Image: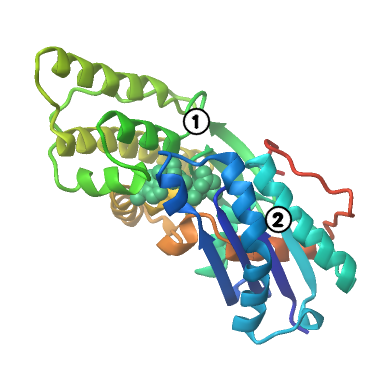
Amino acid sequence: MSTYILAIETSCDETSMAIIKDGHDEIATVVLSQMDTHANYGGVVPEIASRMHIENITLVAEEVLRKANMKMDDITAIAVTYGPGLIGSLLIGLMAAKTLAFIYHKPLVPVHHIAGHIYANNLVRQLEFPLIALVISGGHTELIYMKEDYSFEKLGGTLDDAVGEAYDKVARVIDVPYPGGPLVDKLAHEGKDTYPLPLPLDDDSYNFSFSGLKSAVINLVHNEKQRGQDIIKENMATSFQNRVVEILTKKTLKALKEYDVHNLIVAGGVAANKGLRERLTKECLANDIHLIVPEIKYCTDNAAMIGAAGYFAYKLGRRADLNLNAKASDMLH
Ligand code: KG4
Ligand code: ZN
């Protein structure tokens, strides 16, 4: 018998629900983005995000069932992102999940947001183990070793800013509107690598650091301003992106080699980055590595990925009761 997971994701500024069959078949997904609203403020405003989740969540629930042509009776279990994320936003999704689980007597499965990003790849193709996951988003930059389903061993992570955060901050400094990441990526394809930016934390560890690179961009922008000049945005975007892609690729390839792994998956919002996708595709081809990157729509926050991860968590017997609480931060486990 098939397992149908109704998944709920509200950790940031997307209200999303999905129905996923057996961890890989997307039956229906609805994503209501609040990006246009937050763009007015140059970033996500937590109080506005939670209020909008409240307004949208019932509509999204009705819409996902309608789209799937299913009833709550057809659902096996409810999976929900419990963290990490914005507390107020997470709480709305949790409340919806608990209410549905209680009323319809369904098991409640807690899902870590990053497990979701990783399992977005299972919607593309069944994961093969062992694998290395490069998780890169607005809140995370991590290299994770997985020897089997739902086993996560962190090899290293960022010591300061997450890579997406660095993109968003650099975007602001070079006057690129919110959301910065995708626009800097676009500009990077139009410019030349002319600015002398450092390769950040180029050492033997699997850790990353992006605050120094960000400061170097800020300093260059200020220096040019003092001389009464403006930087060339496209060239700064290319120079910045090249350093980021270089260090991410270098440490990821090192991990694949050291752990003798031939499967690489990339996860999180920054997995949408075209420069990185191109570079990794090329390197993986040359090094006999099997690369999986999710479709762009599964890179940024969505409930389909939570439904895919939720299936494996459900199979492993992971359950929560109605005391399940939101966690702003939590180790992936
Ligand atoms: O995974 P996500 O949607 O939310 C978090 O869980 O953080 O990731 C959002 C982050 C933002 O920082 C955004 O600027 C970045 O992903 N991002 C990109 C691109 N698309 C989204 N960064 C670089 N290049 C892109 N194409
Ligand atoms: Zn995310």
Position of residue 111 relative to residue 32, above or below, is above
Instruction: Give the side of residue 18 with respect to residue 208, left or right.
Output: right
Instruction: Give the side of residue 137 with respect to residue 184, left or right.
Output: right
Let me know if residue 332 appears in the view. Answer: no
> Foreground: 260 or 17?
17
Residue at the bottom extreme, as displayed? 69
Q: Which mark is residue 93?
A: 2
Q: Residues within 10 Å of mark 1 (few under 14, many from 20)?
A: many
**Tag 1: amino acid:** Tyr
Q: Quadrant of residue 10?
A: bottom right
Q: Identify the element where label 1 is drawn.
A: loop
Give the total number of marks visible in the rendering. 2
Position of residue 287 relative to residue 79, above or below, is above
Where residue 229 appears, as percent x and y from the top left, is: 9, 21
Instruction: State the scheme by which the image is colored.
Output: rainbow
Position of residue 32 relative to residue 110, above or below, is below
Residue at the left extreme, as displayed? 228
Residue at x 57% of width, y 65% of height: 122
Residue at x 37% of width, y 19% of height: 212
Where residue 306 appears, as percent x and y from the top left, is: 64, 60
| Image quadrant containing the C terminus | top right
Position of residue 330 relative to residue 61, above or below, is above
Where residue 249 appears, as percent x and y from the top left, is: 37, 41
Q: Identify the element where label 2 is drawn.
A: helix
Marks 2, 1: nearer the viewer: 2
Q: Measure the C-alpha gap from mark 2 to mark 1.
A: 33 Å
Where residue 89 appears, as percent x and y from the top left, is: 65, 47
> Counting residues from the N terminus, which is met first, the one under dot 2 or under dot 1?
2
Tag 1 residue: 206
Q: Residues within 10 Å of mark 2 (few under 14, many from 20)?
A: many
